[in-house]
Image (tube, grey):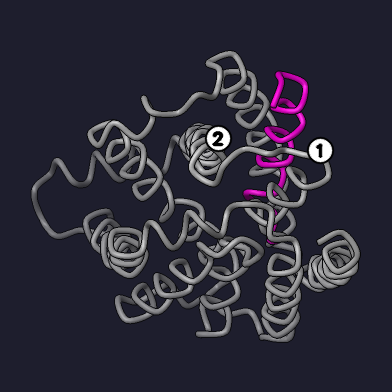
Amino acid sequence: MNEFDAAILGVIQGLTEFLPVSSSGHLELGKAILGDTSVPEESLLFTVVLHFATALSTLVVFKKDVVEIFRGLFQFKWNEETEFSAKIIISMIPAAFIGFYFEDELESLFGGNVLFVGFMLIITALLLWLADKAKNTQKKVSFSNAFVIGVSQAISILPGISRSGATISTSVLLGNDKTKAARFSFLMVVPLIVGKIVKDLLDGNLAESTTEASVLIVGFIAAFIAGLAACTWMITLVKKSKLSYFAIYCFVVGVAAIIFGYYNY
């Protein structure tokens, strides 16, 4: 992989992380189209770096929310910010469990399996279509909702299942307000991504990669800039309840990926 390919994949990651179309699925499709021959471990490393970039863009877009959360936590009493943080922690449990005990199995899925990605994109399309039919409310995410949404986040580790699409759809189908669902969805993933980076650093996994630093840096910058734009745009789109458009897009891309994978593998 060269710097040009890294920039393209970075933009794909930044745009698709916040849009409910599966960033991991699009990255795998991008790698297949660009002819990326990286082994799964190296492919996963590049994917993790791009996810870290979009996590940083999330913190920038929601900086006021993040500051308020930390300010509330340091009051050392039960308040709205503490409650929100507790829900975030609960939502992390399923994905943390899957990531810790099934890391090797997950790595093997990030090797350009276009057929698998195609079928998962169609499942994402179905989730978005169902969520688009749900009525909007003023209900906020409850503790039990947080765990169920966390299960959706764990499932969305699979390439082709949109993390934002799965978590927002699950939250909306549980009867939560769409704007609150989007805010919770975007913020709940940040601790997991940061935790993954720290774990890889402690395990020495990042040092084992042969991927050039320049490739990682270019991909990171591209993903960060694209992420800033996409996150801001997605907040507006969720408020307007236009998930059906993304459902159609995921279905079309999913079918195209299945056809591509069938004739090329």
Q: Identify whether 175 is placed above or below 79.
A: below
The answer to which quarter of the image holds residue 128 is: bottom right
Q: Residue type at mark 2: give it.
A: Phe
Residue holding disc 1: 34
204 left or right, relative to 131: left
Q: Magenta residues, as a range? A: 1-20
Q: Residues within 10 Å of mark 2 (few under 14, many from 20)?
A: many
Q: Residue type at mark 1: give it.
A: Leu
Q: Secondary structure at mark 1?
A: helix
Q: Residue at x 23, y 62 (%)?
A: 86
Q: Residue at x 73, y 34 (%)?
A: 11
Q: Residue at x 64, y 32 (%)?
A: 223
Q: Identify whether 13 is placed above or below 168.
A: above
Q: Depth check: give the residue in front, 121 or 244.
A: 121
Residue holding disc 2: 46
Q: Depth check: give the residue in front, 149 or 251.
A: 251
Split into 4 quadrants, where in the image is the N terminus?
A: top right
The answer to which quarter of the image holds residue 232 is: top right
Disc assigned to residue 157: none
Q: Secondary structure at mark 2?
A: helix
Q: Identify whether 23 is placed above or below 159.
A: above
